[in-house]
Amino acid sequence: MHRFATLVVLVVAPLALTGVLRAAGEPPAWAYAIAPPAAPGAAAAPAAAPDMSLKTVPGSTLRVTLPEVRGVNGAGPADWFPGDHPVMPEVVARGRAPAVRPCSLCHYPNGKGRPENAGVSGLPVSYFIQQMNDFRAGLRKAGDPRKANTEAMAAIAKGMTPEEIKQSAEYFGAMKWTPWIRVVETRTVPKTVISPLGMYLRLEGNETEPIGMRIIETPEDVERTEELRDPRSGFIAYAPVGSVKKGEALVTSGGNGRTVACGLCHGADLQGSGPVPGIGGRSPSYLVRQMYEMQVGARRGEWSDLMKPVVAKLTDEDYVNIAAYVSSRAPQSIATK
């Protein structure tokens, strides 16, 4: 946990505790989770000696060091559960240095991903390929230019061959999306810090703060996610009380003309329809970033143009309510309804 303790010293999460709309042109800050810069004149924390002890996660027989978790000397990142997924193509498992990072590093071998990036398992192959080509063509930009991993994804896409893109699309498309995020309505949330990668991490202790008009998406287990990248350890999405019900009205009926019922394209269960991707049970942070980026034209392309009139009238509160409802619609909850 020493690395997490360092984050607490260096990074303090900004409070976004009111329900008012952001200033015109500004993105919804909570969805982007940009770590604030260090205070002027603040001394950097001394570098800790590297932890070279062997680590594991519950249920895995693998024992590796922290550097090996992320991949060292051209090796791919640790694969804790090789039996949970098909055999990875080389581009997914190891990438191709120096231009192409392994897909499994950020999106995990099972494609579940984390709030700062995308969950890609279960996406239609044609949709996946189209999005990679949009990245290559400069049609997908971050709504907040400080979100560096969007530009990193564009660079990776440009470095991949068409065959590598096809292989990764087929690999992730072969795995169904399964429950990964637990939506909890609340008036207060645990106090958090934002990691340099853009993820809310709970502070130790029991301090809380008002949730305001935002969703705080944080690991169920900070160490297993932030340090060990455990692909079986999911996330909690704290949402305002009543947001799921309000979101249901927008998602299922369009909210009296404010938007369009999502099921018309994404399927009645929100798990996708033909080439249109599933959105149910996926990261609320990612969903809101995409809606905002389509609304302001940062994300363009074939499918984005179809979404632009759908998101044109949405407010910050609409974003929160829609994401809370959609993220609560995991395949498991739909099947047992």
Image: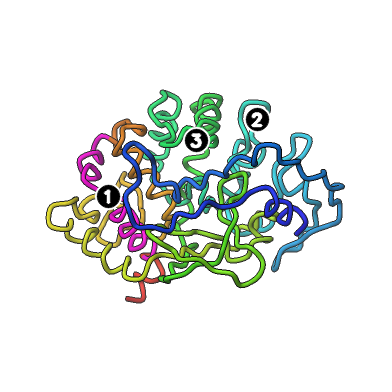
Disc 2 vs disc 1: which is toward the camera? Answer: 1
From the viewer's perspective, tell me whether residue 307 is left or right of residue 29: left
Mark-to-mark CA distance, 2 and 1:
41 Å
Measured Cα–Cα span from mark 2 to mark 3 = 19 Å
Judged by its main secondary structure, the magenta piece is helix
Does residue 212 belong to the magenta stretch? no
Foreground: 246 or 210?
Answer: 210
> Residue drawn at (66%, 37%), measured in percent from left and top?
40
Q: Pick whichever, 198 or 156, lies toward us.
A: 198
Q: Tell me which residue sits at (47%, 45%) in the image.
A: 32
| Mark 2 surroundings within 10 Å by alpha-carbon count, few (fewer than 14), some (14 through 19), many (20 or more) | some
Give yes or no for contact between labels 2 and 3 (Cβ–Cβ under 8 Å). no
Indicate the position of residue 75 as horizontal and vertical percent values.
74, 39
In this rendering, the answer to whether 119 lies above or below 312 is below
Amino acid at the residue labelled 1: Thr
Q: Position of residue 225 (x, y in %)?
A: 63, 57
Could one spot residue 179 in this view of the protein?
no
Q: Which residue is mark 1?
A: 315
Q: Is residue 321 magenta?
A: yes
Neighbor class of circle 1 (other Cα within 10 Å; few <14, some 14-19, many 20+) is some
Q: Residue farthest to the bottom? A: 336
Q: Which residue is tagged 2?
A: 96
**Start and end of the magenta stretch?**
305-328
Q: Is residue 331 above or below residue 108?
A: below
Q: At 77% across and 39% down in the image, what residue appears?
A: 72
> Pointer 3: residues within 10 angstroms few (<14), some, or many (20+)?
some
Left or right, 168 with respect to 277, comes to right
Report the side of 134 relative to 190 (left or right).
left
| x, y percent for residue 309 | 20, 40
Q: Which of the two labelled residues, at mark 2 and mark 1, occupies the earlier sequence position?
A: 2
